[in-house]
């Protein structure tokens, strides 16, 4: 485990630790919050740090610091703690703010990381909401928190989970353990239904471009298959409407009509994260995963 410092502005740095995971994420020790790019399409992406993602720092000056996204909000004394000697919001308050702001998909992507790092309870974030009865976005907080899952290991995994929920399937289990033949180590399956022996996983670009990773993936897939599981691999560029069709053909349990999330949040396509996602990509391509 190695520590570095990520410069946020000229006179402010945030310590981060580098860890090896399937998604090669980096996290901030304050809450262990992952530094996730807003859009992790193949190719270069813009990593965007914002206050709500990092256990929001408390800043009393009226002038916005260069390079830091700030919000003018009311904070109660019970919503402030310290991390590395700096005043920051509590995990519950940190969860409350993204839950009420921005596109819903992006909010859930940003909240899966602190859910895993801090184990914050949705109930505690809802208690925070009770202390702010007139803020914008309050009505959606409960529904957004209900979609959060600490098993989401990357923005793409979160997106894949929500595609399945939107498809009307029973909510998939995340990070299902599968004991290996050495009776000591485990494989963890991204998403799926254990009673159907069905797993759905997102394989990023490194699974194809890294020969060592590719060989390990082949061995892993063969082992999973030998245990009676059926594994669906979702790749960058797959057409999003094709994913529910493949999952249905594999026997996943469907309990509602497709479009669950898009009906709940009408008005803009649910899986269009924000305007940044559309830059440089034809509108038609956004139907791809």
Image (tube, rainbow, N blue to C red):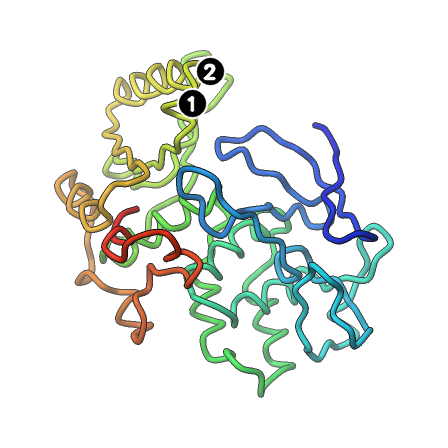
Most distant residue in the front direction: 280
How far across and down, in percent of the image, does residue 240 sit? 24, 49
Which quarter of the figure is the N terminus placed in?
top right
Instruction: Say what secondary structure mark 2 lies in.
Output: loop
Quadrant in which residue 75 is drawn:
bottom right
Cα–Cα gap, marks 2 and 1: 6 Å
How far across and down, in percent of the image, does residue 288 sit? 26, 48
Q: Is residue 86 left or right of residue 211?
A: right
Q: Which mark is residue 23?
A: none
Q: 122 above or below 203?
A: below
Q: Which mark is residue 183?
A: 2
Q: Which residue is mark 1?
A: 179
Task: Identify which residue is drawn at 34% across, 54% down.
Answer: 162
Q: 115 above or below 175?
A: below
Q: Is residue 63 left or right of residue 213?
A: right
The residue closer to the viewer here, 241 or 275, is 275
């Amino acid at each position: 485990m190695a520590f570095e410092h990520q410069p946020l502005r000229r006179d402010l740095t945030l310590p981060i630790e580098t860890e090896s995971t399937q998604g090669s994420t980096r996290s901030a020790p304050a809450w262990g919050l992952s530094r996730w790019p807003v859009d992790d399409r193949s190719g270069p992406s813009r990593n965007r740090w914002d206050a709500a993602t990092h256990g929001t720092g408390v800043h009393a000056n009226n002038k916005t610091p260069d390079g830091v996204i700030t919000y003018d909000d009311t904070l109660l004394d019970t919503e402030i703690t310290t991390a590395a000697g700096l005043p920051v919001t509590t995990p519950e308050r940190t969860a409350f703010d993204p839950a009420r702001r921005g596109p819903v998909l992006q909010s859930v992507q940003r909240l899966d990381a602190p859910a895993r790092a801090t184990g914050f309870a949705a109930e505690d974030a809802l208690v925070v909401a009770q202390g702010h009865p007139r803020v914008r976005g309050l009505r959606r907080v409960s529904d957004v928190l209900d979609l959060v899952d600490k098993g989401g290991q990357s923005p793409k995994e979160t997106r894949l989970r929500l595609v399945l929920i939107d498809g009307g399937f029973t909510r998939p289990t995340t990070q299902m353990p599968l004991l290996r033949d050495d009776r000591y180590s485990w494989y963890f399956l991204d998403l799926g239904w254990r009673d159907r022996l069905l797993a759905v996983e997102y394989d990023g670009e490194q699974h194809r471009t890294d020969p060592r990773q590719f060989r390990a993936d082949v061995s892993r897939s063969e082992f999973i298959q030998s245990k009676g599981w059926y594994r669906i691999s979702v790749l960058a560029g797959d057409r999003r409407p094709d994913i529910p069709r493949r999952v249905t053909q594999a026997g996943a349990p469907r309990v509602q009509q497709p479009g669950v999330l898009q009906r709940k949040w009408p008005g803009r396509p649910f899986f269009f994260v924000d305007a940044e996602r559309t830059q440089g990509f034809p509108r038609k391509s956004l139907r791809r995963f």
